[in-house]
Amino acid sequence: MAALTLEWTDAAAALPDDDTLVLVALNDAEVWPGWRDGDIWRHLDAVPITGARVTHWMHMPPAPGGAS
């Protein structure tokens, strides 16, 4: 089985589509699931990300065994 390679995207270079769940890396070294709502980054529970800056993002990996 081939290993899946996921890559971080610099948020200054490109952004995901609005309302797309991604992993976000913050400048304080934390990583969380989140999404963009226009110019606002939000945590998974829809609370705006404040107090830290999103520096990178990555698409979510596929579920184990693939989608059914």
Image (cartoon, rainbow, N blue to C red):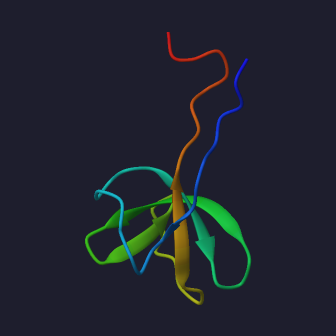
Res. 44 visible in picture: no
- Outermost residue toward the top? 68
Where residue 61 sits, quadrant-wise, is: top right
Please determine whether, in this image, residue 36 is positioned above or below residue 53.
Answer: above
Counting from the top left corner in percent of width and height, residue 19 is at 32, 54
Tell me which residue sits at (74%, 78%) in the image: 29
Counting from the top left corner in percent of width and height, residue 45 is at 52, 57
User: On the rendered image, what quadrant is the N terminus found in?
Assistant: top right
Q: Is residue 34 left or right of residue 51?
A: left
Q: Is residue 18 left or right of residue 26?
A: left
Residue closest to the eye, 63 or 6: 6
Please determine whether, in this image, residue 34 is positioned above or below residue 2.
Answer: below
- Outermost residue toward the bottom? 51
Where residue 16 sits, quadrant-wise, is: bottom left
Tell me which residue sits at (62%, 70%) in the image: 25
Tell me which residue sits at (70%, 24%) in the image: 2
Where residue 62 sits, quadrant-wise, is: top right
Q: Is residue 3 left or right of residue 50?
A: right
**Numbered disc total:** 0
Tell me which residue sits at (53%, 56%) in the image: 58
- Outermost residue toward the front? 2
Counting from the top left corner in percent of width and height, residue 33 is at 58, 56
Res. 36 visible in picture: yes
Please determine whether, in this image, residue 14 is positioned above or below residue 2.
Answer: below
